[in-house]
Image (cartoon, helix red, strand yellow):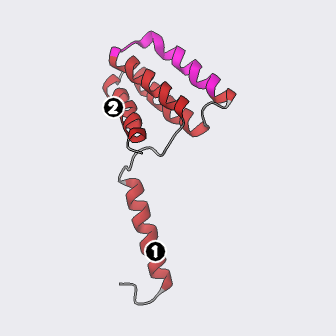
Amino acid sequence: MTNGHPRSAAFLCAAVFATSAIAGCGYPEFGPRAYEIARGLHTICDLKAENQLETVQGTIESDLNEGSITKREAAWLNSIVETAEAGDWQAAMAESRRMLDAQNEL
């Protein structure tokens, strides 16, 4: 109970918000170009097409420079690429799927 203390109510609201964020509510909304790249990245991971990772990194960088994707979107995508480069194809594919699914849920 907050016992009428605004500070306690504010703390409770902040705690609920933080808990929902930590619980993995997924990716927030992102643009159509980032979605396209994530779809391609999912396919690359499914095929374990190591030779395509450098190409997709170049695409991410050029799209970021052109303003087609945001820094946040580029960071998400690059994180998936790094996971794949480390050889954890399953985790990279799962993360790209989570990214795609989060967009489809909006």
Say which element carries label 2. Answer: helix
Residue in the foreground of this view, choosing between 93 and 104: 104
Q: Using the numbered discs, state the Cα–Cα distance from disc 1 to disc 2 in whole angstroms.
A: 34 Å
In the image, taking residue 83 as reference, residue 90 lies left or right, namely left
Residue 82 seen by the camera = no
Residue in the foreground of this view, choosing between 100 and 50: 100
The residue carrying mark 1 is: 11
Disc nearer the start of the sequence (1/2): 1
Residue in the foreground of this view, choosing between 87 and 27: 27
Q: Quick check: 34 above or below 17?
A: above
Give residue 99's quadrant in the image.
top left
The magenta span reads 47-63
| Residue at the image point whose x is 33% and y is 19% from the top | 46
- Tag 2: amino acid: Ala
- Tag 1: amino acid: Phe
In the image, taking residue 68 as reference, residue 101 lies left or right, namely left
Circle 1 Cα neighbour tier, 10 Å, few/some/many (<14 / 14–19 / ≥20): few
Specify whether residue 59 is painted magenta: yes
The residue carrying mark 2 is: 94
Q: Quick check: 59 above or below 32?
A: above
Q: Which mark is residue 49?
A: none
Q: Check the image and name the residue furthest to the top.
A: 51
| Residue at the image point whose x is 47% and y is 87% from the top | 5
